[in-house]
Amino acid sequence: MAEMMSGFDASGEINEKKRQIRDAIIKLDGEGSGSLSIEDLVSLRRDLEDSKVLLEQHSKTINILTSDKEVLDKKKAELDHKFGTLEKEYEELLDKTIAEEEAQVQNNSEFANTITT
């Protein structure tokens, strides 16, 4: 996942593609004839295809990360439940041990009273 995230920060690349497309649109709108050169059209088409591929890659990455997050959330919930159960069992065992020790102290005290009297 860390490897996937390391290549995820493509904001600079996305911004560059946006700028290139915006420049082409401005050029198209700015010219009275409304036409671009063949090179500009090819470049714009290539930029649009690159943007589409980049968008698909980011969508896949987002889907994978969302799935991973769901798995981790499920594991966390399971571990929280297990922790709660263990904590409850520990408290019950602690109470039982304290009660046994108090009973033992009481028995020893009664036995000592019996011997001394």
Image: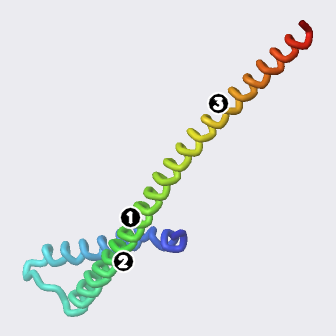
Does the CB distance between marks 2 and 1 fall below 8 Å?
no
Identified by mark 2, the residue type is: Gln
Assign a secondary structure to mark 3.
Answer: helix
Q: CA distance from mark 2 to mark 3?
A: 56 Å
Q: Position of residue 4 (x, y in %)?
A: 49, 73
Q: Residue furthest bottom?
A: 38
Q: Tell me the residue that label 2 is attached to.
A: 57
Q: Position of residue 111 (x, y in %)?
A: 84, 17
Q: Looking at this view, is 29 or 55 the one in front?
A: 55
Residue 15 quadrant:
bottom left
Q: Nearest to the eye among marks 1 and 3: give it.
A: 3
Q: Looking at this view, is 82 or 44 the one in front?
A: 82
Q: Tell me the residue that label 3 is attached to.
A: 95
Relative horizontal placement of residue 37, taking residue 57 as reference (left or right): left
Q: Nearest to the eye among marks 2 and 3: give it.
A: 3
Q: Tell me the residue that label 1 is attached to.
A: 66
Q: CA distance from mark 2 to mark 1?
A: 14 Å
Q: Residues within 10 Å of mark 1 (few under 14, many from 20)?
A: few
Name the image colouring.
Answer: rainbow
Q: Residue furthest right?
A: 116
Relative horizontal placement of residue 67, taking residue 111 as reference (left or right): left
Residue displayed at 7% across by 82% down: 33
Identified by mark 1, the residue type is: Thr
Q: CA distance from mark 1 to mark 3?
A: 43 Å
Residue 94 position (above or below residue 31): above
Q: Position of residue 101 (x, y in %)?
A: 75, 27
Residue displayed at 47% across by 60% down: 72
Residue displayed at 87% across by 15% down: 112
Residue 38 quadrant:
bottom left
Residue 29 quadrant:
bottom left
Assign a secondary structure to mark 2.
Answer: helix
Identified by mark 3, the residue type is: Asp
